[in-house]
Structures are given as structure tokens and as C-alpha cells.
Image: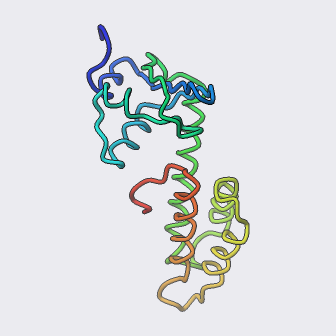
Amino acid sequence: MVGPPKRLEDLSKVEGAVRFTCRACTAVRTIGLDEVIRARLIAKLSTDWEAVRHGSTCPVCESRNVRVDGVPFGERNPEVRARRAEARRLHLALQVLRDAAPRGAYMPVPAVQLALRVLHPFVGDQELLRTYWDQVMGAQKDSPCGGGQLAFRWLVTRLIDRGFPVAAEFQ
């Protein structure tokens, strides 16, 4: 790639990431390319490079006074890798809990316990996790479906409200 990119997708050729430098709060965040593209598409915003540069806000303070740079080989950045690993853990835990919600007591208990432990720092509300546990594991074995679907929806809503990347399949 020679010169600035035309679209965000062009950064994928160099395993790029996007660095946001806020002039107001001096925060510097490097965010993975996939995450930036997904967020812009969900918000129905353009992925043209100039639109990204002039229409972005600070990930910390929401200021519009932000400098946006493409970072080649940014996917190797430890911060980007940590965010991707966090998103993977969140996704796997939600898969386990979604599968356990209708099956109730038929789901292996250690799998549900591990998924709830993984979600605890993300959800931040132990009572909500306990409600899920009570509804799913307290379901009757002869019941055709468990009672955890509503509690699962509450967990997903809490994660979205707290700003965590939740896959569309769970929303």
C-alpha cells in the first residue's frame, strides 16, 4: 500500500489497526480493524478513510477533536490482541449460556459455572448472574424447556449497555 488508504478495508492488506489520539484528554487507543469496521457498519457510517478521519470520536471522552491514524501491522499490538481475546472469551461464554438456557438442568454444570465466571467481570452484577443460574439450573427435568431465556436476554442487554462487543447472533 502506497499512500493513505481510500477505505478502512485497505488497511487489512498490511494487517493494520486504527489508532485514535484524542487532543482533548490525550488518550491514545489502538483498536483492531475488524472492530472499527463493525462499529461503523452497525452505526451505518461510511468506511471511507476521510469520513473516518473527520467523523470519529474519542473512545474515552467522546470528544470530536481526534487524530486518526492507520497503523501497519497493528494487529500485532498487545492492546489489540488483548481486546480480541476479551471478545473471544465473551463470545464463547455467551454461546455456552445460550445453549444452556433452553436445556436447563440437562446442561453440564461445570460448563455453565465456567461461563458465568468468565462473564462476571464483564457484567459487573452478581445478582444478575445468580438469577440466570437459578432460572436455568432450577428448571424441572421434565419441563420441555428451561427458564433461562429471559435471564440470558438480561445478560446480553447488560453487556451491550456496558459497551462490550456482543455478536449479532446474541442480540
The image quadrant that residue 33 belongs to is top left
Give the residue at x 43% y 53%.
167
Q: Residue at x 47, y 23 (%)?
A: 67
Colouring convention used in this rendered image of the protein? rainbow
- Looking at this rendering, what residue extends furthest in the bottom direction? 142
Q: Can you say whether 156 is above or below 28 in the image?
A: below
* Residue 85 drawn at (x, y percent): 57, 39
| Residue 65 coordinates in the image, percent (x, y) | 49, 29
51 w.r.t. 43: above or below = above
Q: Is residue 53 above or below residue 115?
A: above
Q: Quadrant of residue 37?
A: top left
Q: Quadrant of residue 46?
A: top left
Which residue is at a point 49% across and 27% down the rendered structure image?
A: 66
* Location of residue 149 in the rendering, given as x and y in whole percent from the top left corner: 50, 76
How many numbered circles are shown? 0
Which of the pair 32/138 is nearer the observer? 32
- In the displayed image of the protein, which residue is found farthest to the right? 126
Q: Say which residue appears at 37% left-offset and 29% top-offset.
A: 54
> Residue 140 at x, y = what percent?
60, 89
Q: Tell me: 147 left or right of 137.
A: left
Which quadrant does the C terminus fall into?
A: bottom left
For residue 105, side relative to residue 74 (left or right): right
Quadrant holding the N terminus: top left
